[in-house]
Image: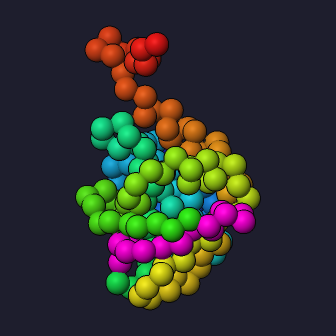
Amino acid sequence: MLKPVPVAALVVWLAAPLSAQEAGWHYSPLDGEGDRAALGCAYGSDAAMFTCLAVRCEDDFSVGLHIHTSRLGGDAGAWRLDIDETSFALRAEPEGSPYHARVAGDVGPLLDGLRNGAVAYLEPQAGAPVHRNGISLAGSLYAINQALYFCTPRTPNGTLERPAG
């Protein structure tokens, strides 16, 4: 027989935010992503207004960096990413993942900064501004490394594939 749920517990559960775009670094809760991506969102982000970066293991086992915001006009285009005191000029292109745009080019230096920095600021170079853009990098090293652990190709017998040499 099922036990009744206390009303107070039900109210707390229903009042909890169900936002995939909460502040901080965590596994991406967007549909189909599971543990293949880490999502870092700006201070104060919620389901209605958010600025996020996603580090994702792509289908071909490459690493992608994605911009995911609630900004009007979409996320494709030119951006500036400041990580601590280092600025990067980015070009984001629309693509088929659950995020709005993927950063083109070599993302290695960006990933190093995101893993080891203190704070990142994401700013579009044209179009509508983002309302929240300060992304804490506390916890980013752990979240990104956890997501990218699964990005190593596997051999047919399920073991990790190691590069030759």
Question: Position of 55 compared to 9: left or right?
Answer: left
Q: Write down the quadrant of residue 8 in the picture.
A: bottom right
Q: Is residue 157 magenta?
A: no
Residue 45 appears in the rendering: no
At x 56%, y 45%, the residue is 144
Counting from the top left corner in percent of width and height, residue 19 is at 50, 66
Residue farthest toward the left in the current orientation of the protein: 96
Question: Position of 165 compared to 101: left or right?
Answer: right
Counting from the top left corner in percent of width and height, residue 71 is at 43, 81
Q: Is residue 70 above or below residue 120?
A: below
Q: Is residue 113 above or below residue 22?
A: above
Q: Nearer the viewer, residue 96 or 24?
A: 96
Is the stretch drawn in magenta largely helix, strand or loop? strand
Q: Nearer the viewer, residue 81 or 45?
A: 81
At x 31%, y 56%, the residue is 97
Residue farthest toward the bottom in the current orientation of the protein: 128
Q: Write down the quadrant of residue 164 in the picture.
A: top left
At x 50%, y 86%, the residue is 129
Q: Nearer the viewer, residue 101 or 12?
A: 101
Q: Write down the quadrant of residue 31 in the picture.
A: bottom left
- Which quadrant, please, contains the N terminus? top left
User: What number of labels is visible?
Assistant: 0
Counting from the top left corner in percent of width and height, residue 156 is at 28, 14
Colouring of the image: rainbow
Residue 67 appears in the rendering: yes
At x 45%, y 32%, the residue is 150
Q: Magenta region: which residues?
A: 74-87
